[in-house]
Image (cartoon, rainbow, N blue to C red):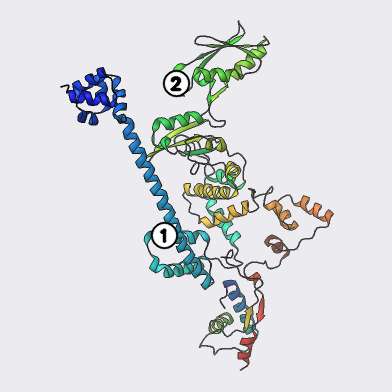
Amino acid sequence: MKYTRFEKARIVGARALQIAMGAPLLIKPPKGVVDPVQLAMLEFEKGLIPITVRRRGKLIKGPAV
Amino acid sequence: MASKATINALIKKGLSKKLAEKVAEYYTLTQLKKVSYEELEEKIGKDAKKVFEKLGRKIEGKEKKEEGKKEKRKGKRRKKEEKEERKIKERTVKDEILKILKERKEYLPPIVVDELAEKIESKKLHNKLRIIVEKAIEEYNKHLMEPFEACGMVAAQSIGEPGTQMTMRTFHYAGVAEINVTLGLPRLIEIVDARKDPSTPMMTVYLEGVYRVNKEKAKEIANKIEVTRLINIAEIETDISNMKVIVKPNLKAMERKDIDMNDLIKAVKKLSKVEIKEGKEKIEILPKDENYRELRRVSEEVKNLKIKGIDGIKRAIIRKEGNEYVIYTEGSNFEKVLELEGVDKTRTITNDIHAIYNVLGIEAARNAIINEAYETLQEQGLNVDIRHIMLVADLMTSDGTIRPIGRQGISGEKASVIARAAFEITVDHLLRAARKGEKDELKGVAENVIVGQPIKLGTGSVELAIDVKKLGKVKK
């Protein structure tokens, strides 16, 4: 699913908090990367974070064509 | 040169013997078929008309005009037909575009679809139609804002920041031809506050048809709309000893403005409580009650008496732009000026937004707001993306009337008590709300900031949930 940048920020942020509080990682950390935010971003890019967004209402782009 | 054959032929056609003889003096029958009316008239005088009639010839000038008119009518008809054909072709292209949109489940605004159809039709790109539409969809989606973007805040800052660079001073004689127009920050404030009368109303009157290219005709219209008062075209004397006001018209000035004595007299007759005596080159006005106060009142009224022109138009100036004449007026009376013959109703504009709202409706008013605000900023050298101004205009006109941004308008109609109290007149709002027992649902930005909660825009709009499918993969 295509996330808006707010959704992405929220997801990455929540995951980074979990990592910072000691949660196990879902990827193998590359050498030298310790920052939770960076690690969360790597997980997000691989699509591994099991957090998603609940969107309420229909996303309408304009009047019915 | 009079040939008997010619004479007889002419008599047969119906001319009198005398006339036939006269004509045959100068021309043979074949020559008569080609000679111009003017030439014949020179030779035989007024009878030329009769000759032409009997010969079945139309008088040259008129004949050519008829031909010209026919050609014009044919040309117009052809143009109309071509236009209709084009419209039908555009509609089929449009239908194809809409079909593609439907199957891809995408959206393009109607105006974009129309423009695409027109361009594809005019440049004959039917074979590339699909690619063009797909590219258009891609570009459109790239430009879309994401949901819950704080567009109002962005728009406010985008207009406000250049606003700090605008001058507070209004320049005199800014604009076309010595007409004073409010510029810069004061003008922007006028627009956003939806002021009912702008401080410098102005109209740009475009003309059509003959009036557009002919200077004299354009002057005619300018004289029709510019207000001429009696004092501009006549000498007014107050004769105290005889208790009357004497008006001596200045014929030259009257001629320049296209006014005759009858117009004058008609206007003067409208005065109340006076007796009017028309003289040879003057008009005497005597107040019915003979006292100084009446005399003075009459004198003042006479001086300011409007003879010609539309109320509100102080000055009208004609200018040539390209190959047409355009009239700029100081003062604005949109309704009345549009009614005049020769005025192009599709292009004439004014800077009085409420006038546009009253005459042309709310959508036109919205466009007027956008144009006026955009031009005001452009004139100051500031480049603000038009979508921010469009947002402001949309907000002002969203309920069908022009609402000012401010206490009397949008800001004062907010549902939240705290937001209104934070804007202006704090204690009033809080007191009234407390007395009524009002509830504030904390839906908007201002109240949430005051209370200390995240706002419902941006990341505050996101509701997280566990993605069960991905969680399954994690356990492995």
- Which structural element holds mark 1? helix
Query: What label does residue B119 carry, if any?
Result: 1
In the picture provided, is B406 more to the left or to the right than B119?
right
Residue extending farthest to the top is: B241
Residue found 65% across the figure and 84% down from its top: A21
What's the residue type where badge 2 is placed? Glu
Image quadrant containing the N terminus of chain B? top left
Where residue A6 appears, x then y in whole percent?
59, 72
Residue extending farthest to the bottom is: B476
In the picture provided, is B312 more to the left or to the right than B139?
right
Q: Nearer the viewer, residue B442 or B13?
A: B13
- What residue does disc 2 label? B255
Quick one: label 2, few (<14), some, or many (20+) residues within 10 Å? few
Where residue B244 appears, x then y in whole percent?
60, 9
Instruction: Kindly indicate whether the residue at mark 1 contacts the one at mark 2 (C-beta within 8 angstroms).
Output: no
- Which structural element holds mark 2? helix
Give the chain of mark 1. B
What's the residue type where badge 1 is placed? Lys
